[in-house]
Image (cartoon, helix red, strand yellow):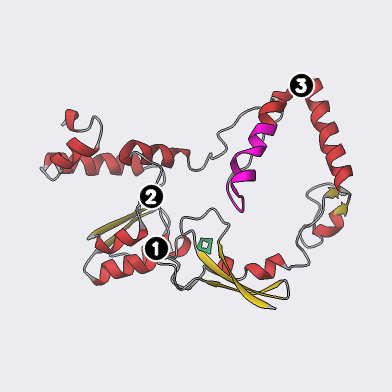
């Protein structure tokens, strides 16, 4: 029997694609972007377009495996499977439990540091059950999202919530600044909206130490040195205030503290 299942991409990606999966006799045979999804527009990124290759790959890890050779031996990458042997779930759980117990009794449970973040995780294993387990264990606590906490704090302080700009709003923009963002390479479904805005006259500025694919397409590419972002941002603010370019009414109603300083 053949049917098409509506799904969502499981990756932790801002595009949040709608996906159509053709299933024949219980096996997925085709994956495609949902043409009815207003952002996905019928195409998937190169990584997920080949998702079924990985789902059914013979190299996929489906069972607990125990390392039987030391790490870092020459050629291990090519012969990775020989470095591991399959064990049962009971053996895996017993081994993990005994190691946790040994660490906790010798050094205290805080010697265990859980570290994980986004990826192909749902709400259950991404941000709930594992926390309960490790909190109960008394393990060290880590913000986990060490790569995005600063951006989240910035979004909350500027627009109140941890939510980026709606992709469909980009078409109304007249000046788009991609600051450290390789949109053309990593946020592919936003690109058509930016192209649409540019067709209507918008300018795209890219600020990035690395000349990305997005930088190569920009109207203006600023190749700054790593670590100089703050100096550039402060310089831009200085010019806006000095030359009367700042929108004072907007700043007064949508920012905290800035208007009092100028
Ligand atoms: S761009 Fe790729 S990773 Fe991101 S949501 Fe779409 S299919 Fe998933």
Q: Which residue is mark 1?
A: 190
> Residue at coordinates 49% horizontally, 58% vertically from top-left?
16
**Above or below — where is 132 with respect to 77?**
above
Query: Could you tell which of marks 1 and 2 lies nearer the N-terminus?
Result: 2
**Observer-nearest residue: 259 or 208?**
259
On whether residue 43 falls in the magenta region, the answer is: no
Instruction: Determine whether the beta carbon of the residue marked 3 sits less than 8 angstroms from the nearest atom of ligand 1.
Output: no
Q: In terms of secondary structure, what is the magenta stretch mainly?
A: helix
Instruction: Using residue 224 as the reference point, say whether residue 27 is left or right of it.
Output: right
Q: Which residue is mark 3?
A: 107
Counting every numbered tag in the picture gives: 3
Q: Secondary structure at mark 1?
A: loop
Q: Give the magenta range.
A: 118-133
Q: Secondary structure at mark 2?
A: loop
On whether residue 122 falls in the magenta region, the answer is: yes
Q: Residues within 10 Å of mark 2 (few under 14, many from 20)?
A: few
**Observer-nearest residue: 227 or 161?**
161
Instruction: Using residue 132 as the reference point, say whether residue 42 is left or right of it.
Output: left
**Above or below — where is 109 with respect to 227?**
above
**Observer-nearest residue: 232 or 169?**
169
Query: Could you tell which of marks 1 and 3 lies nearer the N-terminus?
Result: 3
Q: Position of residue 49 (x, y in %)?
A: 57, 70
Residue sticking out furthest to the left: 244
Q: Which labelled disc corresponds to residue 164? A: 2
Q: CA gap, disc 2 to disc 3?
A: 42 Å
Locate residue 203: give its quadrant.
bottom left
């Amino acid at each position: 029997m053949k049917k098409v299942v509506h799904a969502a991409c499981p990756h932790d990606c801002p595009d949040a694609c709608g996906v159509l999966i053709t299933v024949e006799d219980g096996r997925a045979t085709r994956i495609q972007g949902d043409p009815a999804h207003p952002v996905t527009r019928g195409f998937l990124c190169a990584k997920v377009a080949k998702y079924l290759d990985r789902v059914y790959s013979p190299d996929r890890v489906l069972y607990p495996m125990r390392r039987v050779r030391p790490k870092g031996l020459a050629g291990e990458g090519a012969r990775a499977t020989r470095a591991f042997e399959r064990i049962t779930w009971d053996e895996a759980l017993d081994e993990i439990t005994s190691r946790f117990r040994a660490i906790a009794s010798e050094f205290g449970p805080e010697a265990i540091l859980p570290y994980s973040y986004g990826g192909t995780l749902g709400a259950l294993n991404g941000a709930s059950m594992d926390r309960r387990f490790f909190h109960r264990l008394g393990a060290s606590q880590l913000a986990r999202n060490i790569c995005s906490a600063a951006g989240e704090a910035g979004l909350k302080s500027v627009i109140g919530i941890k939510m980026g700009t709606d992709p469909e709003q980009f078409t109304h923009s007249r000046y788009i600044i991609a600051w450290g963002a390789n949109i053309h390479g990593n946020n592919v479904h936003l690109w058509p909206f930016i192209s649409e805005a540019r067709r209507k006259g918008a300018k795209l500025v890219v600020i990035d130490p690395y000349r990305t694919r997005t930088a190569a397409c920009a109207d203006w590419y600023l190749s700054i040195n790593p670590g100089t972002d703050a100096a550039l941002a402060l310089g831009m603010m200085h010019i806006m205030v000095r030359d009367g370019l700042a929108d004072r009414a907007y700043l007064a109603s949508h920012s905290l503290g800035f208007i009092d300083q100028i």
